[in-house]
Amino acid sequence: MAKLNIEAIHQENKKKDAFDFRAGDTVTVNVKIMEKTADGKAKSRIQPFKGVVIQRKGTGVSSSLTVRKISSGIGVERIFQMHSPLIDSIAIDSHGSVRKARIFYMRNLQGKAARITERKVRAAVQAEGEDAPAETVEATAE
């Protein structure tokens, strides 16, 4: 009985957005920041964090991603919970071509060695004259 309640809570907190990025992709994570003004009122703003995805971890509501960027010559990594209410949006800037799911070796690379080549992504939209497979049509109808 307790398991059903936990699953219901997970479904409530799960975001509807599909996260279709992986390690090596450059993303911009828009984070909601709560600030306190001089008169004591709370004010929120959105702060972008742009960097390369180092890893994705976990499944469901507890999934997270680690993003790394270089700020003033110093590497900064930040771990985000993907279904957190503090995450406003995650935008994919470019798709990178890497061979591993966890690219921690990027921490030791500098300059041109730290570049990631861009991966070509096939468009999901079919040509106008072609019919889509039946499985695709059924999946989109749901």
Image (cartoon, rainbow, N blue to C red):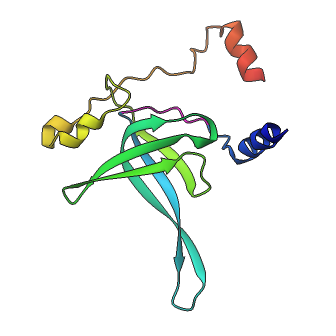
Secondary structure mostly seen in the magenta stretch: loop
Question: What residue is shown at x 49% (from left), y 55% (from top)?
Answer: 30
Q: Is residue 42 left or right of residue 38?
A: right
Q: Nearer the viewer, residue 94 or 14?
A: 14
Q: Position of residue 125 (x, y in %)?
A: 57, 21
Quadrant occupied by the C terminus: top right
Q: Position of residue 41 (x, y in %)?
A: 60, 84
Q: Nearer the viewer, residue 85 or 138?
A: 85
Decide whether residue 114 is among the magenta residues.
no
Whether residue 49 is situated above or below residue 7 in the rendered picture: below
| Magenta highlight range | 18-23
Q: Nearer the viewer, residue 12 or 135?
A: 12
Q: Position of residue 36 (x, y in %)?
A: 53, 81
- Extreme right residue here? 1
- Extreme front residue here? 1
Whether residue 34 is situated above or below residue 85 in the rendered picture: below
